[in-house]
Amino acid sequence: MNIAVSKPDLTIRLCGPRGFCAGVDRAIQIVVLALKAYGAPVYVRHEIVHNRYVVEGLEAKGAIFVEELDEIPAEHRAQPVVFSAHGVPKSVPADADARNLFYLDATCPLVSKVHKQAMRHNRLGRHVVLIGHAGHPEVIGTMGQLPEGTVSLIETVEDADTYEPADPDNLGFVTQTTLSVDDTAGVIARLQERFPNLTAPAADSICYATTNRQEVVKEAAPGCDLFIVVGAPNSSNSKRLVEVALRAGAKKSVLVQRAAEIDWDNIGDIKTVGLSAGASAPEVIVNEIIEAFRARYNAVVELAETVKETENFLVNRELRSIELTTADMAFVNGD
């Protein structure tokens, strides 16, 4: 006689908003539409967004990812090349022009706004202080908007303590869009304390999506035995969500790319799990993780929602006449 084994009860607190922001959605749409408009291959410089699943899905459609433009073979130079959502230094479009390449810029409009703010500081004679993470593509792109030596990168409060500018009374700051609001506030406060004439950007640099995802994680995390953030290890905003969950009261918080990365054997006695996704993480993986829990637990999903996002960024003018269907985006959004 078969005896049914009852599954343990589990509550999944599903954060909203989560996952793709308007800038990421736009960047992926640009590659998909370029493939429809111009045919394969479409080249993409750097990962279009920081997510391996998304990159592999676009590769399956005919996208080819390169790190530098000189990797594009001569016979494909009539095909479009897309610049990633993180933004690129000015030298990249200049290089594309020199090679007679047709390019589509998928830089997030909010990152472009930071570029403009940095250039405005520079135009007004201020030395630019960029708060961000060294080596991140967005930071490389922002620093690459201005002449060498006109931008200083500050990563931590300790950096702010030791920073010695040539002209302390003539500084302006901008920030990487995907940093933690709390962490950035500490660095800015220290800089303002040391340099009272430090000029803020015309508008807050941290993007709405980063702020929204962090705010709902703060609300959902207290009382969670485990908090799962879907995202890539090189995704700045995803790693910040893990930190925010721990600070807000989750007993444990982990970053995973797929359900298979969850350590099911050592998950322990859990009653409540928080679940969110970084701005580059597709909804299909969130669904995959929920189904993986349902296979092991009697799981009930509760939505923890703070705001509804309605932002929508238009794709490049050259692509607006091409129809984008639900089926075109099903590889990331689900059916």
Image: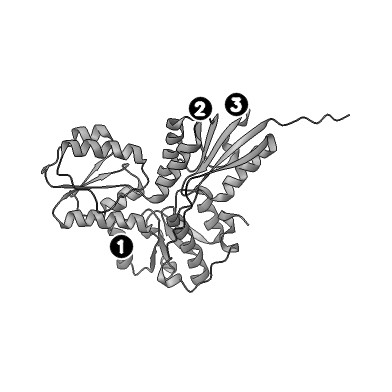
Circle 3 is placed at which residue position? Answer: 266
Residue 198 on image: x %, y %:
17, 44
Residue 8 higher or lower than 43, as above or below = above
Q: Amino acid at mark 2?
A: Lys
* Comes first in the chain, label 1 or label 2: 1
Whole-percent x and y of residue 191? Answer: 21, 38
SS under mark 2: loop
Q: Would residue 228 be seen by someone viewing this image from the given angle?
A: yes
- Which residue is drawn at the image coordinates 63% and 57% (left, top)? 335
Secondary structure at numbered mark 3: helix
> Which marked residue is nearer to the observer: mark 1 or mark 2?
2
Mark 2, residue position: 251
Residue 333 placement, left or right of 120: right
* Residue 107 falls in image quadrant: bottom left
Residue at image mark 1: 95
Q: Amino acid at mark 3?
A: Asn
Q: Are marks 1 and 2 in contact (CB under 8 Å)?
A: no
Q: Please name whichever residue, 236 or 20, is drawn nearer the observer in this view of the structure.
A: 20
Q: In the image shown, does 82 or 279 lie closer to the viewer?
A: 279
- Looking at this view, name the residue that lies furthest to the right: 1
In the rendered image, the residue lying farthest to the front is 306
Q: Nearer the viewer, mark 2 or mark 3?
A: 2
Q: Residues within 10 Å of mark 2 (few under 14, many from 20)?
A: some
User: Looking at the image, is mark 3 or mark 1 earlier in the sequence?
Assistant: 1
Tell me residue 92's x, y (percent).
31, 59
Residue 134 x %, y %: 31, 42
